[in-house]
Amino acid sequence: MSEQRIEGRAHILRVVLILLAIICLARFAMVLLPVDVLTRLAAAFGLLPRGQQTPADAPLFWYSLRISAMLYLTVGLVIFVAARDPVRHRDIVKIGIFSLGVSAALSAGFGPLSAMPPLWYGGDALFSLLFFALLAVFYPRHMEERPGAKA
């Protein structure tokens, strides 16, 4: 593969990683909104649980929402660091590819078993699948070459 093509793929990989990080950080930021704003947004997008006009008013619901937001914050920051130099952080990129694939499969497989609207689990499944595919396609295979290995 030519050096120019390798550089082009590495640039696209960095862009995809930065986009993924921004989306993760935005998902974290959404949870920081006041509850009434979150409720209006959820109603506008049809994201409320079946038959309900408000999100669950239970401490466990809000705790789970906040914990998932913290996970998105952590993932977003780690992916952002990896995006700065994907070659140096190739193990983080590979873990990200694997994790997104698992997340897509679990969201698609277990989502229909829950009482959640299809947009919730379908959105997570499509988001994970899209970024899994993009990262897998643009992950430069030349990064796997070990120093000193015979070509």
Image (tube, rainbow, N blue to C red):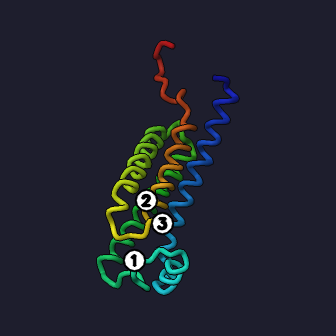
Sequence-first tag of 3 and 2: 2
Residue lying at 35% horizontally and 85% vertically, measured from the top left: 57
What's the residue type where badge 1 is placed? Arg
What's the residue type where badge 2 is placed? Thr
Residue lying at 43% horizontally and 59% vertically, measured from the top left: 74
Sequence-first tag of 3 and 1: 1
Give x and y (percent) for residue 59: 30, 81
* 2 on left or right of 30: right
Q: Are marks 2 and 1 in contact (CB under 8 Å)?
A: no
> Residue 9 appears in which quarter of the rendering?
top right
What's the residue type where badge 3 is placed? Leu
> Residue 23 appears in which quarter of the rendering?
bottom right
Rendered view: 34 above or below 67: below
Q: Nearer the viewer, mark 2 or mark 1?
A: 1
* 30 on left or right of 8: left
Q: CA distance from mark 2 to mark 1?
A: 30 Å
Q: CA distance from mark 3 to mark 1?
A: 12 Å
In the structure shown, which secondary structural element does the residue marked by tag 3 occupy? helix
Q: Dot 3, how many residues are within 10 Å of its Cα: few (below 14), some (14-19), or many (20+)?
A: some
In the structure shown, which secondary structural element does the residue marked by tag 2 occupy? helix
Give the residue at the far right of this rendering.
Answer: 4
The foreground one among 63 and 110 is 110
- Provide the residue designation for mark 3: 119
Tag shown at residue 74: 2
Give x and y (percent) for residue 60: 29, 77
Sequence-first tag of 2 and 1: 1
In the structure shown, which secondary structural element does the residue marked by tag 1 occupy? loop
Residue lying at 58% horizontally and 52% vertically, measured from the top left: 18
Tag shown at residue 50: 1
Q: Dot 1, how many residues are within 10 Å of its Cα: few (below 14), some (14-19), or many (20+)?
A: few
